[in-house]
Amino acid sequence: MSRSGGGFGYILAIVVVVILLLLSVRAWKNAAPAAAQALKPGAPVTFSDHGQPEAAQALRSGNLPDMKKMGKNTDDHIKEINQAAKGQD
């Protein structure tokens, strides 16, 4: 026998959708001020230096090294590590 579905499933689905919408609105309200601040032209930009003040300063000034210089610095660092590793043997 086929039984027609009750209204409980539909009500439960609506409640779940409403809860998800409320959570998404709450998350949007938390993120919206930061997003609005980031979109303002000429707004001051703050950077966390994460223990490297020279990196934050380079970001603020827009004075970032080019990819060739970064590659050379990485290659030099690898050479230094390899030399130090040979000294340990």
Image (cartoon, rainbow, N blue to C red):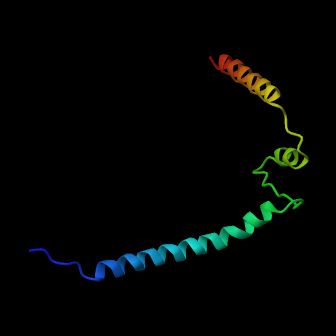
Residue 53, how many percent across, how many down? 84, 48
Residue 66, how many percent across, how many down? 83, 31
In which quarter of the view is residue 12 placed?
Answer: bottom left
Residue 15, how many percent across, how many down? 41, 80
Relative vertical location of residue 5 with respect to residue 54 in this rendering, above or below: below
Nearer to us in this view, 85 or 2: 2
Relative vertical location of residue 74 with respect to residue 37 in this rendering, above or below: above
Nearer to us in this view, 77 or 47: 47
- The answer to whether 20 appears left or right of 62 in the picture is left
In the displayed orientation, state which residue is furthest to the left. 1
Relative vertical location of residue 30 with respect to residue 11 in this rendering, above or below: above
Nearer to us in this view, 22 or 73: 22
Relative vertical location of residue 38 with respect to residue 25 in this rendering, above or below: above
In which quarter of the view is residue 43 placed?
Answer: bottom right
- The answer to whether 15 appears left or right of 39 in the picture is left
What residue appears at the point 56 percent right and 71 percent down from the top-left corner?
24
What residue appears at the point 85 percent right and 39 percent down from the top-left corner?
64
Residue 14, how many percent across, how many down? 40, 78
Could you tell me which quadrant the N terminus lies in?
bottom left
- The answer to whether 1 appears left or right of 11 in the picture is left
What residue appears at the point 71 percent right and 18 percent down from the top-left corner?
83
How many numbered circles are shown? 0
In which quarter of the view is residue 76 placed?
Answer: top right
Could you tell me which quadrant the C terminus lies in?
top right
